[in-house]
Amino acid sequence: MPAIVIATLNAKYIHASLGLRCLLANMDTHGGAGLRERTQLREFVIQQRPAQIVEDLLALKPQVIGLGVYIWNVLETTQVVRLLKALRPDIRLVLGGPEVSHETGEQEICRLADHVITGWGDVSFPKLCRALLDGPQPLMKVIAGEQPALSELALPYGDYTDDDLAKRLLYVEASRGCPFKCEFCLSALDKTAWAFELDRFMAEMARLYERGARNFKFVDRTFNLKVDFSVRILQFFLDRMTGDDGRVQAAPELFVHFEVVPDSLHERLKALIAQFPAGSLQFEVGIQSFNPEVQQRISRRQDNLKTAENLRWLVSQSQAHVHADLIFGLPGETLASFAEGFDRLHALAPHEIQFGILKRLRGTPIARHSADFAMVYDPQPPYTILQNSTVDFATLQRIQRFARYWDMLANSGRFGQTMRLLLTPGSAFGHFLNFSDWLWQTTGKTHEFALEKLVDLLHEHLTAVRGLEGDAVRAALLLDYRASGARGRPHCLAELLGVERTALPAAGVKPRAERQGRHVQQAHRSDIQKAAAAA
């Protein structure tokens, strides 16, 4: 039985915890020989019952349990800690992670725990475990994590299992930290960005690839700032999609996700990006706001013209999937100014616009604006903004629904033809906000819409509310519905689908097993891409 168990609750199974594997890799390096073999890593998901998680943990009979705590799992992890302390108060509970690295005195979970490590845990957690097992016993409950040179850390990639490689999204980091000071982000507290030694890192990537890894998410905040590093990493993946004849595969298994700084895209990077085939490369591009006053207020440096130019190039000159982020609720941003920025971004045609609502992450400098802009946040995680001096509560609720519906319709990719009708002419934001308000008033729902119901609702809105010509609306909806592969019959398309299916020759139907197999592969690929974008 392990003396130490390190565990966390992931949002979904498809996410594999990089943080836990960093701890495991460094148990011997910084805790002394033999500590790693006394440590076991366990991962759960937030959908599991706390009692089930506790049962699994206690069955291992550990002396120390370390738990990774994040904004998405703090409520569930608090329940786990309550049960552990009630059942086995003798087990030493150690917490770490961004959610407990700040404002520790205000959190129930920190009061219940025996120790809390703030900041980096790679060195401090193994040292603490050695002391808890062999003495001398630590005097401090809250321990500031040591931040060593990256060369002193053991890399974690050998601790991804074969099952992880086959079924999950692998998180990797070529660097830590961020040189920028955007006040809504915890990375604003970093002094700079630190890069791992590149030869060492690339050797680990090569080993992962040789073992069968094909889905990589880089968690680096500023992947494209150090051009020489970025070029070498991109070339590594491009080489593995290139055959002996020098041609890049048209449908590669490989998928790589990067977060990029939007106003910095060197020509050397463009030359490589342009060679990646469709489906292999995904970029998360943080725009957040196009409002210069808001950008300055939150200490965000961004060249808006260069950002637009780079986005336009990525969409038109590469096959990368571009996922652009906006944040609603920043101090001083109005509904009108946000709408202007949204329309500007939409005109650049990224494949997805991730519409986020401002959250007050613990420790972030955004808190300094709370009084001046009457910022009111939900006291429960994820601490979403409820209202401020420029946007009232009712408007925030409308925007929350907008964000949900936008994901369901625009970001899902299921309504490409119909969205062109819905969002034009004029303001895309204005059209979709009107649709969002109408959809809420009509249904009172934000979830659990069947695809066929969405088709009929879109038809009703576009024809009855917007007054668009019925044949054009049905033609767009038919193209989208047919492309989805669905086999139902929305009311508005019943006649068209009936005629189409009557005319379909039986010989054109693929065997059921073949269709199902292809669907499973496509669904897994889609899950990987969505997980990379959401995490």
Image (cartoon, grey):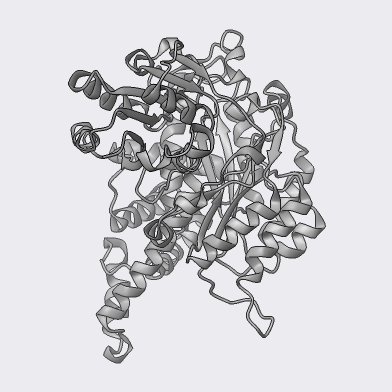
Give residue 306's position: percent from left, percent from top.
Answer: 78, 45
Q: Can residue 87 be seen in this view?
A: yes
Quarter that holds the N terminus: top left
282 or 104, which is in the foreground?
A: 104
* Residue at (58% x, 58% y) in the render: 205
- Percent position of residue 402, x then y: 45, 38
Can residue 382 be seen?
A: no
On screen, residue 212 above or below 396? below
Residue 415 % position (x, y): 44, 59
Q: Which of 334 and 25 is in front in this view?
A: 25
- State left or right for residue 50 relative to residue 28: left
- Considering every residue shown, the one lying at the far bottom of the view is 507
Q: Please indicate whether residue 485 sits to the left or right of residue 392 in the image.
A: left
Looking at this view, is 109 or 71 the one in front? 109
Q: Position of residue 121 (x, y in %)?
A: 51, 30
Locate residue 380: give its quadrant. Answer: top left
Residue at horizontal 78 percent and vertical 53 percent from the top: 228
Instruction: Count the labels in the image.
Output: 0
Q: Looking at the image, is 315 positioned above or below residue 141?
A: below
Residue lying farthest to the top in this orientation: 371
Q: Is residue 9 above or below residue 421?
A: above
* Snapshot quadrant of residue 524: bottom left
Q: Residue lying farthest right?
A: 267
Q: Name which residue lies at 38% across and 68% down.
A: 521
Residue 370 in the figure: left or right of residue 92: right
Q: Quadrant of residue 199?
A: bottom right
